[in-house]
Image (spheres, coloured by chain):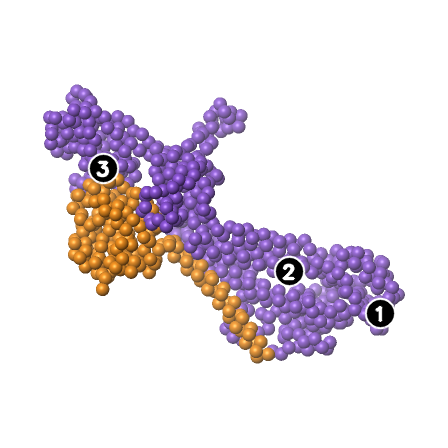
Amino acid sequence: MDKIVCTCGNVNPAGTELCESCGRPLNDETKEKKIVDMRYEGSARRSQTYNKTIIDKVWNFFSSVKVGMWIIVAILVAAAIGTILPQVFYVPATNETDIAAYYERIYGTFGTLYYQLGLSDLYSSWWFQGLVGMLGISLVIASLDRVIPLYKSLKKQKTKRHISFLKRQRVYGIGKADVSEESLLKAEEKLKELKYNVKREGNAILAERGRFSRWGPYVNHLGLIIFLFGVMLRALPGFYVDETMWLREGETLYVPETHGYFLESKEFIYETYSKEESKEVYGEAIDRVGTIAKNYQTDVALYKGPEGAVAGHTEDLTFEKEASIQVNKPIKFDNFSVFQMDFRLDELATMTFQLQDKQTQQSFGEFTIDLADPQPIYELNDGYKVEVMDYYADFTGFEEGVPQSQSPLPNNPAFLIKMYSPEFPKGETSFVMIKETVEPLGENQHKIAFQSVETRDVSGLTVRKDLTLPLLALGGLIFMIGVAQGAYWNHRRIWIQLLEDGQTVIAAHTNKNWLSVKRDLDKVTDVAHLPKYLDQQDIDSLEEKVDKVEGV
Amino acid sequence: MAQSKKQRFYMRTAILAVLVVAIVFTVYSNLNKEKNAVLQVGDKAPDFVLVDMDGTERRLSDYKGQGVFLNFWGTWCKPCAKEMPAMDNQYAEFTDKGVQTLAINIGESDLKVNSFLNRYGLTFPIAIDRNKSVMESYNIDPLPTTFLVNPEGKIEKIIKGEMTEEDIANFMDQIKPS
């Protein structure tokens, strides 16, 4: 692999097709072509020149745009497959068996297969993330391999190019026109007027415009890489938090991942539109579906634990602020946002009972049990008292005589209670459930009579923190700048040369929008009386379709 | 020429290495994050302070130099109830050998926890994590989950699910100060 020395004296890297300086074709294949491939200025894409070590081979693999395309296709297909059934994240089950059962129950055999193949958690699978990573590698390497040689050859290009380069341009014309120094000056002036960057070297003119549009794709890739880097940062601790918490009215809980913040729910508010207030807008809909939600809101107070306090610390919380969290109006603190996401209405909070005589229904006093913190003893009047021996929040029945509770949530509260009265100083035992009472140790004279309940609402909140957002926005912005740069501008070049034999050559190249460069050229030839040009591709396609675009 | 080829080789190797490391790291940490966010074996056990049912303040860092058998539980959780008497036996066995036992209840009421420990006659310290901050900092799921904290205050092992008495004895032995 030696460097190629061109007749003009320029030393080109191995693999170069067109001399960086004068544009002479450097290999036979290029020489045989009627029109040269200008995509990378005939520069040596380094990926195609060395292929020796393993590293080179891996490098070349990722440098290929074809490979990059297939990676994109693979990601697209995989991402599409992930949308066929809901992902695990959206399935109302938390453990493996429940999730598997869910897929089978709802989607049958296909669901089971989907789950077993791991497609139900596709986006966090190692292979999907690996594919995205490979796309990242491909972006970096393919860009590096192209942008560097392209930059070099655009920088090195000479104003005066060899005739063998010019005649292989798509737009080309030659003729013994009546061209003098004066008309060259006129051409120069016109080109400047057309906002070209004009260079003159002897009898040669190079007019160039919009070269920066050639960097569009690479700017675009840079944006993508920044974006992917931002996504990558989410894996690092401290950059990204997405947690949920259930907060009951009156409860103060630690906010997950926040290192020392606590939220107290003052009230949950659920409002619906009334027919009177919005007859015009929602009247029909209310008739049809019953209720239409107007507001979901949790009024909270935010507290901060003392600096450097360890978990479990419940005292010395300092009040930070109060806020009403509504949908899309989170409470914000310290880069965290807490959003209103869900709710449960009317969870049992307190239950009020009376101690009564079973026969006469005479009351010996009332007591209220706070289900979050039941007390062992409730003293009533005249020597009557009630002892709560045990409490079952979510009572499911007896197992070998022992009452069972399946969760700590007060879905079906039951109490083991001893009733003390002057007649029964040793107490009567009663097992009190909703709408039912069991007397395990024989007939009682007294009973616990249910009076009323108070309920409270539960707010489902989402805790979010995303420090990668600015980076993602930056990546997106750069991406769009790159797109615009490459799409709305184009790189046009016009060469005009007076040859020694008295002929005049004109040639033009653009990376897109050939009509406009031809129009520019028309204006210049009109003023400067240059020879007529032809679009050689048009002629070609008329004659035969030989031209095969070289694969990338 | 040879020089530049070598340079290119090193350049390419370096770029590829950086990219591959970044990707492997991302995929690896994403996979781990789902299984067990934040805490891993070898990490420092997050400090906490809780008041136990006897009113004694229990602070994890006060146990430095001793092993701590840290168990998270709830009264409704059946495997928790099953392993607790066994834990109590082993607590009696190991407490003089420098292994302390601490059971943390997830936010239930005093009454419920008291009735539970009276029923099973438990003697080791039990504390209630009322605002669930200890649970959050240890990222507990499911119950029971047990953390073995070694005398240096580092997490030696994380056990999810029920343990037999033999397991418990082995685990306690594992964090015995030498």
Write down the residue under mark 2: A215
Measured as percent of width and height from the top left, residue A525 is found at 83, 60
Subunit bearing disc 1? A
Write down the residue under mark 3: A391
The tint of chain A in the picture is purple
Lower position in the chain sequence, tag 2 or tag 3? 2
* Badge 2 element: helix
Residue A503 marker: 1
* Badge 1 element: loop
Look at label 1 and name its amino acid.
Gln
Look at label 2 and name its amino acid.
Trp
**Are the residues under marks 2 and 3 on the same chain?**
yes
Look at label 3 and name its amino acid.
Tyr
Position of A290 compared to B86: left or right?
right
Lower position in the chain sequence, tag 1 or tag 3? 3
Q: Nearer the viewer, residue A493 or B117?
A: B117
Q: Disc 1 versus disc 2: distance between alpha carbons?
A: 35 Å
